[in-house]
Image (cartoon, rainbow, N blue to C red):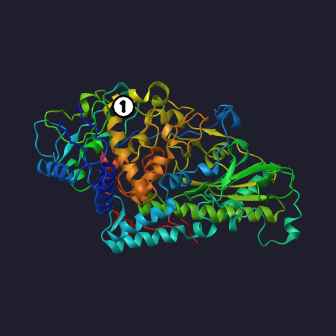
Amino acid sequence: MAGGISHIKGRLSMNTIKTVIAILIILNIASFISADQSEIPEIIDFTCRTNTKAALVDYPTRFEGPVRFSHKKHVESYGAGCGDCHHDSELYPIEVYDPSETYSCEECHYDRGLVRGPKIENNMSEADQLMHRPNAIHAQCLGCHKKFNKEKHLVVAPEACISCHKKQY
Amino acid sequence: MTEINPKNIGSFSRRRFLEMIASLSLVSASGVWAGQQFDLPDLVIADSDMPKIKVAMAAKKAALRHQCRPDMARFSGKHMAFKVISEELGAPSASEIMVNQIMKNVRAGKIGKGVSAKDPSEARMFLALNTAATTWNMIVGPYGENHENMGFLGWLPQGLPPELTANPVSLKDKRDTSKKIKAIAAYAGSDKTGITEIDRRWVYSSTCKNGEDPGPAISKPILFKKTDQPKETEKALILPDSVRYAVVMLFVQPRALHQIDPATLANNASVNQGYSQMGIASVSLAQAIRSLGYVAIPCMNDTAMSVPLSIDAGLGELGRLGFLITPEFGPHVRIAKVLTNMPMATDKPIEFGVTEYCRDCGICARECPSGAISPDKEMTFEPPPGADPCGNPGALKWYVDGKKCLRWWLESGGGCSRCVNVCPYTRATMGDVLPPGQIRPEDFWDLDHKAYGRRDITY
């Protein structure tokens, strides 16, 4: 996960702002999947495997199938910046894409399988839950969508499983 | 990592800059999302083993059938999902959001998220069907909740001669009374009726008079007191202590409309037709009981919890999906009730293996579009944390996250019944009208339509 970001306080000059915008446009922001990529990945396919013990014992939803995430669309059409989803090792939002860093969620959120329901309440701390990648990604995606919907007083940004997950049999 | 030196420029701070970008993004994203077309996954129901239904009288009495912690509180009407979600979204009304979404869908020729009609005019036709289905529901008092003791759902006799309402008919044979009340209920529209003594744990602790406002709940407690007639004061709704019985009625919903899912106008029409029948029947039966000189409180979703009352009345068992599962119609029913002080023989709870079947099945949890149904093998006393405060802790069951469920309705623009539709008890009892896996909304119009859209009535 990217680290060492300077957290700027105070005010920015117009030149700085222009520079940031220019960098974002020229570099097309960045991919967090591969540090070598210089363009925003158009699509990111999350495999959403449910191979945890919990998932085998219980009943996973059929909508835990793969998610095709429209990464570029979120950046270009919805105006999302890197820091809206990606954070550094100190949990500060990424300010600017750094090709020398990795942006893979898996690097830190390495546990698999969504942990949910009473299990969360009884057995796991919030930090432990977030070690499970699906929990972290759900928190980011749903958290942002719910925040957006609250601003709009609507449910327009998708929240339901079916809206993102492809059904699996 | 690139360093950016902070420099001042006028009053344009970094925070302000980011806020501006964020709000611009929000506005543009809202437009994009509003116009986005989604292709939902194909919803084919996988084959599952059908339950074998063999009904037996429950070994335990009604009150002992429910496993509840002593600290379980009575449910409050202010914790209904429509109220809670309206508060969460800061919206004038969750229903209004749904109506807006419906209109948006219809303009685009859709009857739900990812479910297209042939064209916008056919989508309008489904909306018309839904309008017909829900009209009596709206007239009586939409869905009942937040309409306790209002209009047709008023708690006192309406337009009946005092000679009747003030003089209770002498009823010596409780069994005979039950039989006749069930017959009257059938003629009022009930598809099956059961009678139970009221377990007060299932009566709401309070109502909510502003059930869809984002602001603080305007709530009144429901109290039982020594009084002849029910009444409402500035501070409370009061039921007579003598109101000890509930007549619980089931209403079968149109199967074909339910099959056009998930969360579509067709589903809405099916459910709303059930609600209209609930409204008509509960008010009609209440008036009949009042004409016999007894107190009668007509209820739809309001005043008391329908599912535990119907279990106590011997109409079915609780399923994983949070619905009553009946041996005749699976969970494909709606439930209304009339609370009364008319002495009647009560029915005994039944068992036909629902809990055991649901533990091993779980298809509703797998198919739920919003992940609202507990996927866990075992039941719990606690709802999922996210369901707070809609889930009422303390009863052993598979909890359903009502908030997730309703937010999906608002997202899609239609009440969802996917869980009911896929339940093997539905399919074992009601069968399929439209062929699963090949459902096209337009095929609905070519069906042989029944009276009330749900059953054969020969005149």
Horizontal side of B309 relative to B406 (left or right) equals right
Front in this rendered view, residue B198 or B69: B69
Label 1, residues with CA under 10 Å away: few <14, some 14-19, many ≥20 = many
State the residue at coordinates (78%, 54%).
Answer: B238
The image shows residue A59 at horizontal and vertical percentages of 40, 34
State the residue at coordinates (73%, 43%).
Answer: B200
The image shows residue B437 at horizontal and vertical percentages of 31, 53
Figure quadrant of the N terminus of chain B: top left
State the residue at coordinates (69%, 65%).
Answer: B150
Front in this rendered view, residue B141 or B167: B141
Residue B276 lies in what quarter of the image? bottom right
Q: Residue furthest bottom?
A: B121
Residue B32 lies in what quarter of the image? bottom left
Horizontal side of B58 relative to B179 (left or right) equals left
Label count reads: 1
The image shows residue A154 at horizontal and vertical percentages of 42, 58
In the depicted structure, whether residue B82 falls above or below residue B35:
above
State the residue at coordinates (48%, 31%).
Answer: A118
In the depicted structure, whether residue A120 falls above or below residue B210:
above
Horizontal side of B161 relative to B202 (left or right) equals right
Q: Mark 1 highlights which residue?
A: A130
The answer to whether one can see residue A38 in this image is yes
Front in this rendered view, residue B96 or B321: B96
Q: Secondary structure at mark 1?
A: helix
Figure quadrant of the C terminus of chain B: bottom right
Chain of the residue under label 1: A
- Residue type at numbered disc 1: Leu
Residue B82 lies in what quarter of the image? bottom right
Front in this rendered view, residue B202 or A24: A24
The image shows residue B383 at horizontal and vertical percentages of 53, 37
The answer to whether one can see residue B455 in this image is no
